[in-house]
Structure formats: C-alpha cells, structure tokens
Image (cartoon, grey):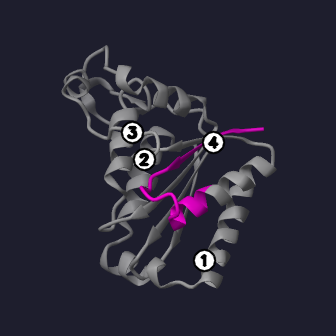
C-alpha cells in the first residue's frame, strides 16, 4: 500500500478537474492505496510567498512554519498526483504558489556550495502523475508553446527535487469543446493510469 498525496487546484467543485481528481482517488483507493486529498482552494491555501519565507530562503534556518502541515503531507507521500487546469499555458497561481512555498530549501532540495545545482531531498518519492486540462488543441501546446507546463514540472520541479520519481502526464486538450463521451474516455484513461502509478 502506498501513501498518495492528490493535489487538486481548481476553484469550482463541479469542474472537470474535480471529476478527474475523484476518479483518480477512487482508482487509487480501489487498489489499496491511502489517498490524502489536498484541495488547495477548499483548504484556502495561501499561495503568497511571505517576506519572512523569502528572507530566510538562503539561511540555515528556512521559515517553514506557515506551511508545516503541507510539508508534513508531502513528506509522508510515496506518490503525488496533481490535477489542475492550464490557464494561459501555465498552472493556476495557487498551484505555482504551492511549489514556491512548500518546495523550499530543507524540504524539497538543499542548496549546494556556491549555489550551483541544487541537491534533491524528495528522495523517497516514487512517482508523480500530473493530469491537466487545456482549452487549446494539442498542436498549439506542442508546436506553438513547446509544452511549457510539461517542461516546468518534468525538468524544473520533479526532475530537480525528485529525479528518481517516475513522471507521467496526461492532458485533455480542447476541453471546452469535448462531449460527454470523450470526457468519459479521458476519465477512464485517468483511472487506468492511476491504477498503475
């Protein structure tokens, strides 16, 4: 049995992202995993990196006090599932703020002498699954934008802080235009992927 942290970043309870998170949680629970759902909007997570947090970012005593619960939940996880929409070809500000505030030095990574390449700390994290929705077509994200969220998560965050973790990403494109049948096909794909995470 694995401990899974499922992070949902969408303000609407009846959104497609909420349905995706529910399906993923059900698939993980069905296979015996313990799922901790962190709904950033429902839990009123504050994405603002505070002055104190930033001032102590490069000290031997970073300020983790305001996000201690989120850090505990992250460090307890064997696997992480992220569910979020892409707005302006990026993750919502609340999710970016989560990474800014929770993935701090002493938690997700350590600085190295001279502030070169960081040293990863999330070494027990086995897998990360990112599931997102996007209003644009796949070709727009790929050819015009270069899949910015995929690169940011795969290389800049997971690759830097948990390089041993298997990273997978599913994106539902043209989300506003899809019909119920295509929605259900994507939800089943989420279920299958979560079940093999």
Label 1's element?
Answer: helix
Q: How far is disc 4 from disc 3 in space, using C-alphas?
A: 25 Å
Which of these two is toward me, 130 or 143?
A: 130
Q: Check the image and report above or below for 177 versus 5.
A: below
The residue where tag 2 is placed is 41
Residues under numbered marks 4 and 1 in contact, where contact means CB atoms less than 8 Å apart: no
Distance of label 2 from label 1 (alpha carbons): 23 Å
Q: Position of residue 143 (x, y in %)?
A: 35, 80
Q: Residues at badges 3 and 2 in contact (C-beta under 8 Å)? A: yes
Question: Which label's residue is closer to the chain start, 2 or 1?
Answer: 2
Can residue 88 be found in the magenta stretch? no
Residue at point 35%, 64% (across, down) = 148
Along the viewing direction, whichever of 89 and 44 lies nearer the viewer:
44
- Which residue appears at 34% of the width and 66% of the height? 87
Q: Earlier in the sequence, mark 4 or mark 3?
A: 3
Disc 4: which residue: 126
Above/below status of 171 relative to 22: below
């Amino acid at each position: 049995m694995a401990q899974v942290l499922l992070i949902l970043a969408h303000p609407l309870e009846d959104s497609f992202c909420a349905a995706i998170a529910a399906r993923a949680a059900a698939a993980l629970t069905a296979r015996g995993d313990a799922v901790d759902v962190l709904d950033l909007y429902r839990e009123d997570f504050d994405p603002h990196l505070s002055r104190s947090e930033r001032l102590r970012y490069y000290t031997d005593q970073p300020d983790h006090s305001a996000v201690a619960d989120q850090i505990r939940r992250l460090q307890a996880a064997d696997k992480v599932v992220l569910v979020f929409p892409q707005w302006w070809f990026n993750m919502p500000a609340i999710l970016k703020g989560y990474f800014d505030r929770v993935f701090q030095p002493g938690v997700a990574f350590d600085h190295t002498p001279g502030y070169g390449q960081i040293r990863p700390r999330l070494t027990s994290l086995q897998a990360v699954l990112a599931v997102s929705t996007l209003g644009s077509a796949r070709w727009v994200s790929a050819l015009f934008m270069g899949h910015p969220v995929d690169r940011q998560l795969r290389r800049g965050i997971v690759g830097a802080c948990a390089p041993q973790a298997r990273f997978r990403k599913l994106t539902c494109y043209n989300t506003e235009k899809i019909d119920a049948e295509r929605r259900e096909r994507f939800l089943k794909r989420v279920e299958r992927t979560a079940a093999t995470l």
